[in-house]
Each structure stands twice: as C-alpha cells, then as structure tokens.
Image (spheres, grey):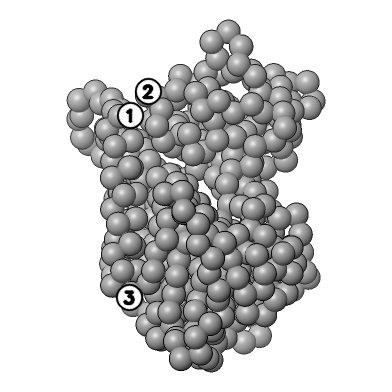
Amino acid sequence: MNSESPPQFLVIGGGPAGSAAATTAASQGRAVTVVEKDIVGGGAHLWDCIPSKTMSASAIRMDSIRHASRLGLKTEPSAVDMTGLSTRMAAITADINQGLVDLLDSQNVDLLSGTARLTGPHSALVKLKDGGETQLRFDHCLLSTGSAPRVPEWASVDGERILTTRHAYDLPEVPDHMVVIGSGVTGVEFVHIFAALGSEVTLVVSRQQVLPYRDPEVAATLEEDFIERGIQMVIGARASSVERENGGVVVRCDDGRVVEGSHALLAIGSVPLTADLGLDDAGVTHEDGFITVDEYQRTSVPHIYAAGDCTGQMPLSSVAAMQGRKIGRHISGMTVTPLDYSKVSQAVFTQPEIASVGLEEVDAAAHGRKVRTTKVPFAANARSVLQGSTRGFVKVISDPATGVVLGGTIVGHRASELIGIVALAVSANVNIRQLVETLMVHPSAAEAITEAAE
C-alpha cells in the first residue's frame, strides 16, 4: 500500500449500511471502494422493504375505495392491475438504486459490480460480473452483505405457488387464497396487503398471538381487525410441510391441522448472507452465520466492521444506515457514540399501522420496573373520527418518579409518522409535562399523544 495515498476503505455490500458508510467516509477524505453484487441500496431494503410498502400503499387505497361509502362517497367497482403494480414497484426500486449510484459517484466512491471474499485481514478478492478478478488491499473494511428470506427444509419454493416474500411482487394476478406462514412483522404485513387486494387469506400462527413478543393489547387490536376482514387464523400451529396439490397448495401443521389455498407465502425470518465472505480466512468471529460485533460495530478483527442484517441486530434499514454513518465517522477518527437500540423507532405497516419506540409496557412488567402508563383511544380523537379511522390507541410510558418519557406505542392510521413525536421525546429525555403542554394542530391525530400524556 502507498502510505501517501488516502487510507483505503473497502465496503462489501452496498445496502443502507454500506452506502451510508461509504458516503460518510468519502466526505472525510477516505478513498472508498464499494463492491455490490446486485443492487445499490441493498436487497433487504429494495427487494423487501420498499416493494412491500409500495404494495401496501396500493392495498390501502383499494381498501379505502371499498369502504368509501362510510364517508358518504359512491365509487365505481374497482379492480387491481397486478402488472401495473409490479411495474410501479420496479420503477421505484430502479429510481432509488440510480439515485444512490449517482450519490456514490458524486463522492468519488469507486463502485465495483461483483462479489468480494476476504483472503486475509487486509485483503479481498473481488470477482467482477464481467468475469474479471481483482485483488484489493484495505486499511478498514465494512461487511454489510445483508440477508435473504429463510426457506426451511420442508418447503420447496417454486416462485409460482409456494413463495418467499421476494416472489410476491411479480404475481400475474391476485391470488384466490393466500396462506401466509409466519405471524411476525413481515407475515402480518402481507396478510393485510393480500386481504386488501381481494384475496382470501389464512394466517398460520405458531404461537398464541400474532406479533409474538409484542404488547398483547397491540396484537389483540390487530387480530380484531383481521377477524373483521374475514381473515382466518390458525392459532398455535407450526407449519411442518407445504406442497402443491390439485392446482393449489396444502399446508400441514404439526398438530394435524391442514390448510388449503391457491398460494402459500413463507414469512418466517431471514438468514445472513455471509457464507462466502471468507470470514475464517480473515479471523472474523461469527455464530450461525451472523457476524459478532461490539458497540462500535467492530468485529473480532478491530479494523474490520460489520453492520446491518448480517450482524443479527435489529433488522431495520434505518438502523443499518445509522450504523453505517457511525462507522464512516469512526474510521475517520471522529468521536462516535454507540447506537442506543433502546430508542429505535419501529413500525408494522398493516392497517391500522403499529409503531413503537423505547420501553414497552410488556417489557417493563417482565423486568418488574415501575412505570406510568396512560392511554387514549383514537375513537376519542376528532381527526380520527372525521376520517373514519378510529381503530387503535396511543399509549405513553413515563417514569413515575421523574416524569421522563420512556416510550410509547401507537396503533392507528399513520402511526409510523406519529411515532416520531414520541421518539423525539424519548431521545431528548423530555418530561411528560412538556409533552402535555405542547400545542398540536386541531383537529389532528397528534393531539392524541398530548392527551395520552395527561
């Protein structure tokens, strides 16, 4: 390495973490090379998050049209154009990808299309898509290769009838009967999407509630909505096989129950894409494929970092991007504070939406921590009533001794936007009295937050 040249920073994987780290480090004068095999912006982000939320937006509009009569409107019969929807999703993904490519180029980041494998603690072999190879040496490296949907041994995914989430965006028509296997965040989001688009939907729930480990009151609200929509739920059953039969699919559960449908969608988690990274050759510690990191995202080899889904930490694009920015600053010698995961906002894009930040009531109870919990239903909020979106509530959690806002949960229309107010309060250690005295627009759904704080 030429000691007079800028320190070389190699980023393997151009997703939210990789692209954020690259642009941050480049802005500090680092020489940066990004190796990406598919799409800048990341598979988990641009093949999972963005398309699913685009699909959800269309599903919400369809749902609104169907129920327009509640608002005194008459609408013509409507139908879903799956080809048009797929085209729109692809266009959005392409636009985001190109925007990130242009951003990297403007920062003089060297972007290589291909795959990279560590060959030692300071070197990597890059196999380019055009068939060539190049050996790179680096001072620092970021591993941000993301994840892919998990496919169990008992499921033979064909992309036609038996699907992972990444097959859900190119279906030629709305499925007659979609069987969703998995009731975590991804599973319930696709239940909402396909039900709103017009499919009959059955959800296989391996535990006793949807969204396991979340607030039971939140889960109950979502289950109530599912029941009203005619969604069938097979509670407490773990799928053990899914096969194509009689032109459709048959899902068999470990308790003997059987569900038939036209399609089956697997939404049972993800696996890290680290098998071909050469982690052992570089001395990087990992467990079950997930790369072990410290609070600064450093691996067991201090100048090699890892971020995003491949670490097994919170699998959120927002988290990965923040990790990337912090890494870009850290390798540039800047002071960095570790990311506080207890203050991360997260959302479930069902209808109603679910969003939370900070401490949840169920977690406080599990740890025996005393908290003050106040709640207001959206049925008591003027804006929600006039919009016809009264399902859900706002719950604010604070410290009874100091009054500091510790967390909040919102279930309702645009909860993912409203949670930002509570997130700011949690991040800034705002006293609940300050939240109460904040004047919101009237009428607005945000008023429910200050009312709940009282």
Residue under label 1: 82
Look at 53% across and 69% down and name the residue there.
Answer: 136
Task: Name which quarter of the figure residue 286 lies in.
Answer: bottom right
Q: Nearer the viewer, residue 414 or 445?
A: 414
Between label 3 and label 1, give the one nearer the viewer.
3
Q: Position of residue 72 (x, y in %)?
A: 22, 36
Q: How many marks?
A: 3
Q: Percent x, y for residue 218?
A: 58, 51
Mark 2 residue element:
loop
Are the residues tagged 2 and 1 within 8 Å (C-beta)? yes
- Among the two numbered marks 3 and 1 on one chain, the one whose residue lies closer to the N terminus: 1
Q: CA distance from mark 3 to mark 2?
A: 42 Å
Marks 3 and 1 in Cβ contact (< 8 Å): no
Residue at left 71%, top 25%? 241
Is residue 30 shown above or below 319?
A: below
Q: Is residue 325 left or right of residue 103?
A: right
Which residue position holds label 3?
A: 107
Q: In the rendered structure, find residue 268 and report the number of the disc placed on it.
A: none
Q: Considering the numbered disc 1 on the image, is that residue within a helix, a strand or a loop?
A: helix
Can residue 269 be seen here? The reply is yes
* Amino acid type of the residue that numbered disc 2 sits on in the rendered structure: Glu
Residue kind at label 3, given as amino acid type: Gln
Name the residue: 60% across, 70% down. Answer: 123
10 Å crowding of disc 1: few (<14), some (14-19), many (20+): some
Residue at numbered disc 2:
173
Mark 1: which amino acid? Answer: Met
| Sequence-wise first label, 3 or 2 | 3
